[in-house]
Amino acid sequence: MLVLVINSGSSSLKYSVRLMDADNPDGGGRRIAGGVVERIGEDEVADHTQAFGVASRELQDALGGQALDAVGHRVVHGGERFTGPVLIDNEITRSIERLNPLAPLHNPPSVLCLRAAVQQWPRVPQVAVFDTAFHRTLPEPAWRYALPDGLYRRYGIRRYGFHGTSVEYVGRRAAALLNVPWEKFDGVVAHLGNGASVTAIQGGRSVDTSMGFTPLEGLVMGTRSGDVDPGILIFLLREGYGADELDSMLNRNSGFKALAGHNDMRAITEAAAGGDEQAGLALEIAAHRLARYIGGYHVACGGARAVVLTGGIGENSAAFRARVLAKLAPLGISLDTAANEAAAGLDEGRTISGPGSAIPVLVVPTDEEAAVADATAAVVLQS
């Protein structure tokens, strides 16, 4: 089975083609082609529809006449309706589109790519795989906000959680590395990239997570604020700020961009190492927030058997990992400096905690495209 995976970001479109074993679709397949279209909305690529056109032309050359058997789409927000991967039709696409306000940076590009892909390959089965699905196991004390019940019943205002596709993939790999059955794995997984979140896993199930009704809540991120006092927003509304202005500020002009002037983590880390106080403060704020969440989720999962770091920052920034783990010393966590420095760029997971660490800390590379390919193949084979 030849599966195309489309991963639409806020300003990028990643794609890969994977050759799956029809008898065993659980290995992510073998990647035979792929690429990325970046800087969407700038230069010559105006939107994700145009970006899809660029990607499809590149794919035709790469495939050399081979026909696709399925297309899998990573979709960030599935709301309460979507509890797992689904075959796409017009009604499903419209339902995803209605969730656009809940993930304004990600769902709209996904909808554009869904429609473009269906138009390009109308007879090829297509599957939506939702980042929220893994978190549908959250217990009510974790997902319910202390707000009037009518807001939940009328608008679906509750914690949904995101990065679930990556978190489950990485969690399963970490459990295997520790020789722990997935259904007995208790741990904390931090997906750290331009978007960042932490999840508490108990018995292989999500029991708490830092992102909420939208992907805005929780950690300090590249351009997103993470947790802020809601009273600040009420204050700013009274000072004349509009809803769109606040949306843009919180989603596109906060986080590392606000604290350090930009959201390039490598440049921020280098600047901090060179004595830039603003960059150092930005890293310290982000590390403080992350360590606080990890400590809380150690409790939420009933005692973590592992802390797992993944995502672009989690996998590649040894300096930021060291900064965070230093704050986790009260949990008995210690760092193996040499292992931490050697962890970047590895295909397999690596333990970076010291031999006497009370809780092992692992860096495990994520592969959301492999996870989406697995889910797509399984849905198509069952349909």
Image: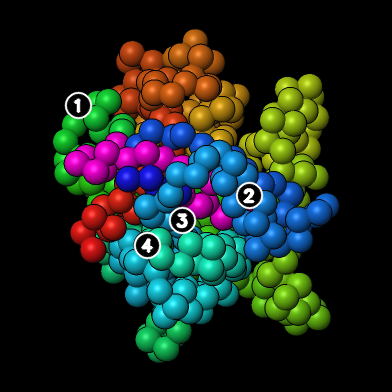
Residues under labels 4 and 1: Cα distance?
36 Å
The three-letter amino acid code for the residue at tag 4 is Pro
Whole-percent x and y of residue 91?
A: 42, 80
Closer to viewer: mark 3 or mark 4: 4
Residues under labels 4 and 2: Cα distance?
20 Å
| Residue plotted at (81% across, 54% down) | 44
The three-letter amino acid code for the residue at tag 2 is Arg
Say which mark, if any, is on residue 179: 1
Q: Is residue 300 left or right of residue 132?
A: left
Q: Earlier in the sequence, mark 3 or mark 4?
A: 3
Residues under labels 1 and 3: Cα distance?
29 Å
Q: In this figure, which residue is indicated by the disc labeled 4? A: 125
Relative vertical location of residue 134 with respect to residue 346 in this rendering, above or below: below
The three-letter amino acid code for the residue at tag 3 is Arg
Label 4 packing within 10 angstroms: few (<14), some (14-19), many (20+): many
Q: Earlier in the sequence, mark 3 or mark 2?
A: 2
| Residue plotted at (40% across, 61% down) | 124
Whole-percent x and y of residue 102?
A: 53, 71
Kindly check if marks 4 and 2 are in contact, taking CB atoms under 8 A apart as contact: no
Q: Nearer the viewer, residue 351 or 286?
A: 351
Closer to viewer: mark 1 or mark 2: 2
Q: In this figure, which residue is indicated by the disc labeled 3? A: 74
Q: Is residue 83 left or right of residue 92?
A: left
Which quadrant does the N terminus fall into?
A: top left
Give the residues in magenta.
5-28
Instruction: Indicate whether residue 10 is drawn in magenta.
Output: yes
Label 2 packing within 10 angstroms: few (<14), some (14-19), many (20+): few
Q: In this figure, which residue is indicated by the disc labeled 2? A: 57
Q: Nearer the viewer, residue 286 or 125?
A: 125
